Image: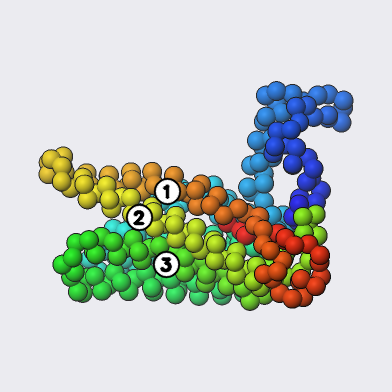
Amino acid sequence: MFGPLGSQAGSVASDLGSGVLSTYSLPRGKLLVGLEFSKIREAWKRSLSAVHPDDSKLIPVPFRPAALLPFMTPMVFLSLVPGKSLKSMILPQLSLCSYSAAFNIINGNASYNRHLYESVLLGAGAVASTTFFALVPHLLLIKYELKNILLRRALPVVILAHVSALNVLASRSLETTRGIEVMDKEGKVIGYSRKAGAKAVKDTAASRAMLFGTSALIPEVFSHFYKQTQLFVRFPQSLWTLKLSCTILAMGLMVPVSFSVFPNIERIQCGKLEEEIQSATEETELFYNRGV
């Protein structure tokens, strides 16, 4: 539906994805059935996850949606480990913000014109700003010891959720200023909408805050109850093993949830868009790629 890939293979993709076809005719007249057909359908789905829907370019392997879990889980875990000095906190926070910015830019909407240097400068600015905002509260915790245990546990979780959302807003800010493509149900481009771009970025930021906020909260909750057990008294070092396991479990559960809470291809009422777009079509509902 979107981009060269969708325009050339849309009907086949629809049939393969929905499982409507029970047989598929090959050029030599052979029929592909059963297990072989299932393999083709699965291969097609995987190819779509490796190709950007706007420009049909291959997404680098480390930044594909499937790579988010193995790359981000250790970064999230290390970013939540209490640091005793500035040096011990910079690398985990810088790594987390750098990977997040690159992932957001690569998997964002790519239907508008942008140059490579613009993406590089935008990513550098997003990394610098979000790393700063992530470090400041941790430094305050070191300098001014909070007696409220609940606040000390909750503050890193709140910081991580807000910083992850801020990273999306900063790294994909061009979508809100230049606009993204909006299309009708046939895939015809109607125009570029800044309002649709703002909604795409806002929804993605909300899903990212939910992902990292929940993934940081669950290990803290389990750790609180684990500290009250005899096992913790006998083996205090096991706390970090528990936290790492909980982080892996939480991220594994929340990554698919956060990706699906808002559809990649979102709908928007034409009346909520710019006047020039409303005057260019009679459709009441248009579509756009939200990105990941």
Question: Is residue 29 shown above or below 197?
Answer: above
| Amino acid found under the numbered disc labelled 3 | Val
Lateral position of residue 286 relative to residue 195, left or right: right
- Within 10 Å of disc 2 (Cα), the crowding (few <14, some 14-19, many 20+) is many
Q: What's the residue at 43%, 71% (across, down)?
A: 130
Image coords of residue 7 (percent x, y): 80, 51
Number of other residues with Cα within 10 Å of mark 3, as a class: few under 14, some 14 to 19, many 20 or more: many
Q: Estimate the spatial distance between the alpha carbons at disc 2 and disc 1, rounded to whole Å.
A: 9 Å
Q: CA distance from mark 3 to mark 1?
A: 17 Å
The kind of residue tagged 1 is: Met
First in sequence: mark 3 vs mark 1: 3
The numbered mark at residue 163 is 3
* Tag 1 secondary structure: helix
* Spatial separation of the CA atoms under disc 3 and disc 2: 13 Å
**In front here: 238 or 197?**
197
- Please report whichever mark, 2 or 1, sits nearer to the chain's N-terminal start: 2
State the residue at coordinates (76%, 71%). 277
Q: Is residue 206 visible?
A: yes
Label 3 or label 2, whichever comes before in sequence order: 3
Choose top left, top right, bottom left or bottom right for residue 195. Answer: bottom right
Query: What residue is disc 2 on?
Result: 216
Q: 262 or 241: nearer the eye?
A: 262
Tell whether 124 sits left or right of 156. right
Query: Residue beneath label 1, please?
Result: 251
Tell me residue 68's x, y (percent): 50, 51
